[in-house]
Amino acid sequence: MEIIPAIDIIEGKCVRLTKGDYCCKTVYNDNPVDVAREFEDNGFSRLHVVDLDGAKSRHIVNDSVLREITCSTNLKVDFGGGIKTSEDIDKAFDAGACIVTIGSVAVSDEHLFLDWLDRYGADRIILGADVRDGKISVNGWKEDSDKELIPFLRHYVTKGVRTVLCTDISRDGTLTGPSIDLYRQVLAEMPELHLIASGGVSSTDDIIALHHAGVPAVVFGKAYYEGRIDVDRLKTAAIL
């Protein structure tokens, strides 16, 4: 199982939101680079970085922070938030991202998304599927589309998508546990997907439960910052 810690960035700082609400923000560290180094020192090899300013502004804002992280660690970084144009995606890769997560563009401009998928390859593009009440949300979770999760994913799997980051917005940042039944449903429909679960992880037990449910990858943030993730236990369980 891929265990992927997350760093969300607002104004250059490491933060977490609750249910995507920018008014419910907690700052955990003024220097995301220090946090990234800590993750690397603890044995993690992947990192999920989200430019929340970019998601809200509809263009990348914190690419300089991304560059600092990728220049200061050997972590394999996937980056999302604010990637709306070809200039944005090039900026993310130029700043050292190995992979990018694309959500809103996949809803608003299928042609552009598929062009990126063809140009960069399915191993460098993650389809972001942020879900609220069964529908895909876009633009920093401020707007809900009319796209339903399963048909949305199935459509893009037929177009070549192999990796999906699925976030249950209702649980994100709440520490109430992940939506395991939702992820089981997705994998039952599309077992070939490399599904990354996101939202609600509250403890080491949640990560182990996702592993036992057959979920191939998980992103977590707040649980780690709140001291609820036992890295040694993950290593003992042969998950990390």
Image: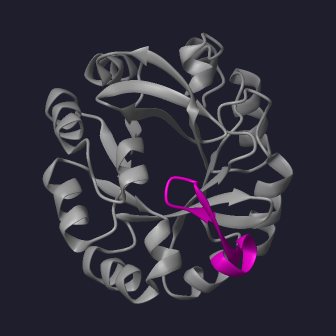
Residue 43, picture quadrant: top left
Residue drawn at x 42%, y 28% as measured from the top left? 44
Residue ranking furthest to the front:
23
Closer to the camera, 21 or 68? 21
Does residue 145 show up magenta in the picture? Answer: yes
Horizontally, residue 136 falls left or right of residue 107, namely: right
Q: Name the spot of residue 170 as percent of width and height, x first.
A: 75, 45
Q: Which residues are magenta?
A: 137-152
In the rendered image, the quadrant that contains the C terminus is top right
Closer to the camera, 64 or 121? 64
Closer to the camera, 93 or 135? 135
Residue drawn at x 31%, y 24% as measured from the top left? 32
Q: Name the spot of residue 190 as percent of width and height, x first.
A: 71, 73
Residue 24, picture quadrant: top right
Q: Name the spot of residue 103 as percent of width and height, x first.
A: 49, 65
Q: Name the spot of residue 77 as percent of width and height, x first.
A: 32, 43
Q: Measured along the vertical axis of the image, is residue 195 above or below residue 173?
A: below
Residue drawn at x 58%, y 80% as measured from the top left? 157
The reply to whether residue 177 is in sight is yes
Horizontally, residue 32 falls left or right of residue 86, namely: right
Residue 7, picture quadrant: top left
The reply to whether residue 194 is in sight is no
